[in-house]
Every structure is written in structure tokens, then in C-alpha cells.
Image (cartoon, grey):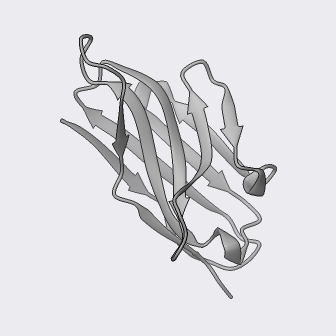
Amino acid sequence: QVQLVESGGGLVQPGGSLRLSCAASGSIFSIHAMGWYRQAPGKQRELVAVIISGGNTNYADSVKGRFTISRDNAKNTVYLQMNSLKPEDTAVYYCNCQMRSSWYRPVSDYWGQGTQVTVSS
């Protein structure tokens, strides 16, 4: 079993900052990538940021220069530092992990339960 536990969401005013965390635990053989997606009401889930095992990162154009993704490999934890938040960043943020749970299993997607981020004055 693999679990992803997220924390750090909440209510923040426009221009403010939040830091999301996601810790993976359980049967983990190797992690290929960890990232964050978000889904606003009435919209499809979209990629926010991803960091792969070699350290390369990729961001949605809408968050470049404002959000920073990082990872602590020793703790199997990924972080998302969100600065200069805007009302349009309001969404449920989901942690995603692409990993192998055993050496003989293929890379699979695992998801966290989601954490609400609301940007409002």
C-alpha cells in the first residue's frame, strides 16, 4: 500500500503565500516523479508543477515565476511554495507520485486526497 498525505492548504489573501507538502509512505521501491495538479470548480484537473528524479522541473505557464516545486528524496516528500497568489489559483490541489511499489511492478500513478487552496480578500 502507498499513501500520499498532503498538508498546507488554506485561505490566503491575494498576494500572499502558502506552502504545500506531500509525503509518500508505504511500499516504495523507486520514485520517478512527484508533482502537483489542481482542479477548480467546473474545470478539468491541470498540471501545476512536476519534479522528476533527476531534479528537472516543469511548470504550468500560469504559475511560472510564482510557484516553486522542490523535493526531499530522503523523506519522499514534495513541496510547492506558492507566492504572489491570485484568486484564479483557487482550487483543490492534488499531489501526484509516479513510482514503482516493487522492482517487478510498472511505474504507476498515485494520488493524494487533495487540499483546498482559496485565495480571496
Q: Is residue 120 above or below residue 82?
A: below
Question: Residue 105, how many percent across, how many down?
Answer: 25, 18
Quadrant containing the C terminus is bottom right
Given the current orientation, which residue lies at the most extreme bottom position?
121
41 on left or right of 66? left
Query: Residue at point 44% right, 43% down?
Result: 96
Expressed as whole percent of the image width and height from the top left, the position of residue 116 reads 47, 70
User: Residue at the spot x=73%, y=72% of the render?
Assistant: 86
Picture quadrant of residue 16: bottom right
Task: Pick out the residue farthest to the left.
Answer: 1
Residue drawn at (63%, 42%), measured in percent from left and top?
69
41 sits left or right of 98 in the view: right
Viewer-closest of 21 and 2: 2
Residue drawn at 36 percent across, 47 percent down: 111
Location of residue 38 in the rendering, given as x and y in whole percent from the top left corner: 53, 59
Q: Is residue 103 above or below residue 95?
A: above
